[in-house]
Image (cartoon, rainbow, N blue to C red):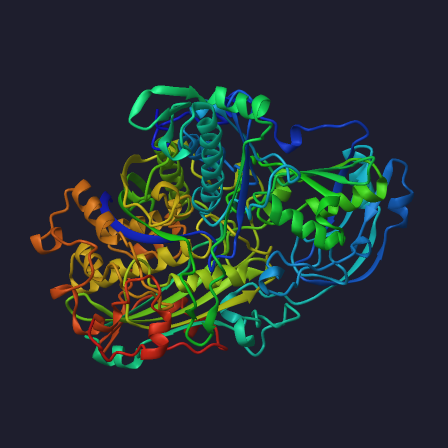
Amino acid sequence: MAVHRGRGVAAIEYPTGMNQNGDPSQAWIKVKPDGRVDVFSGTADIGNGAKTIQSQIVAETIGVPYDWVTFDNSNTDSSPVCTGTFASRATFVAGKAVLKAAEEVRHKLLEIAGLEMEASADDLEVVDGEVMVKGSPTEKLSVADVAGAATYGHGQLITGTGAQLKPYAEILDPETGVVSSPPHSAISYAACAAEVEVDDETGNVRVLKLIQAYDVGKAINPALVEGQIQGGAIMGLGLAVLENAYPYYPSVEHRGYGFGSYYSPGMEDLPELETIIIENPSADGPYGAKGIGEMANNAQPAAIAAAVHDAAGVWITELPITPELVLKALEAKAEPRREGKLVAFDDEISVNTVGAGISWMP
Amino acid sequence: MKAVGARLPRYDGVGHVTGQTQFVDDVRVREMLWAKALRSPHHHAAITRMDTSKAEAMPGVEAVITHADVPLLEYGHLSALGIPADEPLLAKDEVRYKGQPIALVAAEDADTARAGVEAIEIDYEERPTLFDVRKAFDDDAPTVHRWGNWYPHFEGEMDRRQIRKGNIEEAFEAADTIVSGVYRPAAIEHAPLETQVSMVVPEPDGRLTVYSCTQALYFSLGVMAAHLQVPLNRLKVVGGTVGGGFGGKVDTASETVTALAAMKANRPVKWRWTREEEFLASSTRAPWHMEIIDAVTSDGWILGRKMLTLHDSGAYARFSPYGLTKHSFHHTGAYTIPNLHFDGYVVFTNRVPTTAMRGFGVTSVSFATETHMSRIADVLGLDPFEVRLKNANRINDTSPNMITYPDPSTVDVVLSIAEATDHSLDDAYMSMSRAQRSGDMLPEHLAAQIGEGHEHASLHALVHGVDNDSEGN
C-alpha cells in the first residue's frame, strides 16, 4: 500500500465565436457634454468580465481614461443585438463591435476638435483624455472641452455604432464536412501539465499541481485572463476526478439534488497553479485577442488521466476518475487486446460489446 | 495610461464582493405573484388526462398555464439555423423526462402556488425508457422520440454528422500500429449559485418587462417573441448581470412561461426554481461516448483516425446538433491528421435534455483525443511531448473541413509547458516552431496537407482533390 506520484500532459485548441459563425454583435456609444462615454452593448456578463473588457477596449480606442467609461448592457431597449455570452465570443466578437463604435466616436471627436483648434482632424490624436496635434503635444484641448463644444457650440451629438458579423460558414458537402469558409473567428491553443498522487489503498486521486500555458492572442486584462485560466482549471479538475450528474450513468438514479449531495470542487481540492500567458496576436481580433473562456476547462481531464496512468499504471477513460474506478482498475490489471498490429483498449465498454444495433470496427 | 493590457479593476467587482449587485431575484415589485411548476414524475409517459379546474378555482391562484395557452408551442433555439424544433414549451400529450414542466401555477404566495400544483388532476400511462446511448440502435430498443432514437436532420437529411478526408483504408494499411480506445466523460451540473429565475411585469402600455438571468438577451428575446407570436418591441428583456451561467442559461428556461402567467393574471409574476429543481430538472452538460482508432507509425506519426461519437442529448435536441458538429470539426485536436473517418450521432434518451456548457462539444473530444495521444505514446514507448510536437498543427496545415490554420500555437504551448516542467527534450524538438512544415516535419503523408496560406483551402481542395497523392507544396 503506497501513494504514487505521476505526471501527465495535454495540448488543446478551441475556436473563438459560434461554430460556423453567423452570430452578430452590435454596440453604440454616446459622449456626454463633459467627454464621459456611455457604451450600450447587449453582452451579458456571466462573470467572464465582459463589462470590464469592453470598457477597456472603448477607453483605449477613443483615448480616454477607463473610469470615464460607463457600460450599459441592462436591457434590450437601449442595447442593440448581441447573440450572447457563449462560444468564447464576448471578447472577440462583441469586443470588435464596441471597438468599431469607439473608432467612429474618436473620428467624430477629432472632427469637432479640428474645428475648435483650426487644424485638420488627420493631424490630431487623443491621448489620456486630451486632443493634441501629433508631434506637438503643447497644442491641446481636453476631450471634455471638445464634447462641450459639440453639444453647445456646434449642435452635434457625438456617437458611434459598430457591428461585427462573420458570415455563416456553410457545410458544402455533408458527406465530407467540407466548409465554405473558416467556421470560427479564431482558434486558441493551450497546454496543461498535471501532477497527481494516487493512493493504491483508497483509490483516491489528489491533483497536486496544474501548470498551464495559454496563447490568448492579447491579454486585454491579464488579471481577468488569469482568473479565467485558474477558474477553468478547477472546473476541469472537477470534471476529471469529482463531478457527475449521474453517478451510476447511464442509470438516472441517485442524482445529487443540491450542493451537499453533488461533488463540485471545494477549497480542499485546490492544487498549486502555475499560469503562463503567451501572446501570439490573432489576425483580426480586437488588439489581437482571442477567446479562451471556455477552453479553460478542457485540458485538465486528459492531463490528469495521463498522470494517473504514470502514477498507478492504469488508464481510466471514464470520467470522473473516482476511487472506485481506480481500485477496480488496479484489481483488474487489464491488458489491451493485441491482434496483429492492433492494440485495443476498453473492449468492455465499447458499443461492440454493449450495443447490438451499431457496427463499429477496430 | 494604456487601458488595453492593464490589470484594471473589474467593472462590477465592488458590487459583487459586497453583495450589492442586483440580480433578478433581488428585484421585487408590488402585487407580484409567485409561480410553481407541475413537473413530470416519470421518465417517459403518455399524459392521458389533465384537469386544472380545481387549481384554477382555488382562492389565491391567479393563473394556471398549460400547453393550451402557448401561441407557438414548439420553437427551437436554433430554429433560425434550420435545426427543426422538437420540444414543447410545456408538455402536451407526453412527457419524455422526469422533471419536464407540464403546467405553471401563479398565486399570491409560494405555498398557495404549490397547493395549486397539487390540485391539478393528471393521469399518466408509463412508457418504456432508454438511458444507454449504446443500446439506442438495437432492434429491441424502445423508441423515445418522434424522430426515432437519433437526430435525423443534418444537412441532406443525414442522420449523422460525418467527416471524411483522405483515404482512411490506405492509412490503416500503412500503419505500423493501430491503437483503439473508448472515452466516456460524465454529465456534470452547471451548478450556478443563481438558479433559473425570471420575473415578468405587465406594463400599462401593454408591453412586458422581462427580468431574466439569460446569458443571451437577444437570443432569449427572439425565442420568447416566437413562442408568444409578438413583435420584438412588445418585450423588454432586462438582465445582463448573471449569477453564474456556464452555458446553462443559454436555454431560455423560465422566461416564456412566466410571461404567459403574467399576461393571463395581468399581474407581475416571478418564477424562481428551487435548488433541487436546478439540479434535477435543469439541463446538464452532455455525457458522451467516443471511440477512437488511430493508425500510427512506430516513430509516432498519426496517419489516420476513425472515430465514432454518440452524444447523449437527453429527451430533446436543444443545442445538441450544433454541439456535435462543433465536436466533429475539432476531432483531430491540435494536430494535423491527413486521413479521417468520423461518424457522430445525436442520441435521444429519457434524461433531462443536455445543453451547452463551457467548452461545448469540444471538452469531450479534448479529453478523448488527448488521453488517446498519451496512450499512443505509451504503447509506442515514445515521449508524450515529442509525439505531440511532431503532429502539432503548423501554419497553413489543413483542418478536418479543409480550411487552413493561419496561426496555430500548439508547438508554442507544448514547448512552454516542457520548459516549465523541466521536461528534457532533444534539440530537434526544442528548436521546433509553428512555421510551415518543411524538412523532417514534412513527411510524405503530410505533403498534401499544406494549404494555400490564405485561410481558405476548401475551394482548392474541391478542385484539386484531397486524397493522399501529394501535389507538392
Q: In which quarter of the image is residue A96?
A: top left
- Residue found at the very far left of the displayed protein: B427
* Visible residue check, residue A303: yes
Residue plotted at (54% across, 66% down): B347
Q: In which quarter of the image is the C terminus of chain A?
A: bottom left
For residue A352, above or below residue A32: below
Q: In which quarter of the image is the N terminus of chain A?
A: top left
Horizontal side of residue A303 vs B436, given as left or right: right
Could you say which is closer to the camera, residue B114 or residue B286?
B286
> x and y percent of residue B366 in the render?
36, 56
Horizontal side of residue A62 vs B223, given as left or right: left
Residue plotted at (17% across, 53% down): B433
> x and y percent of residue B59 in the render?
90, 36
Could you say which is closer to the camera, residue A81 or residue A124?
A124
Could you say which is closer to the camera, residue A356 or residue B148?
B148
> x and y percent of residue A94 in the render?
49, 43
> x and y percent of residue B159 in the render?
53, 74
Residue plotted at (32% across, 44% down): A217
Residue plotted at (90% across, 40% down): B58
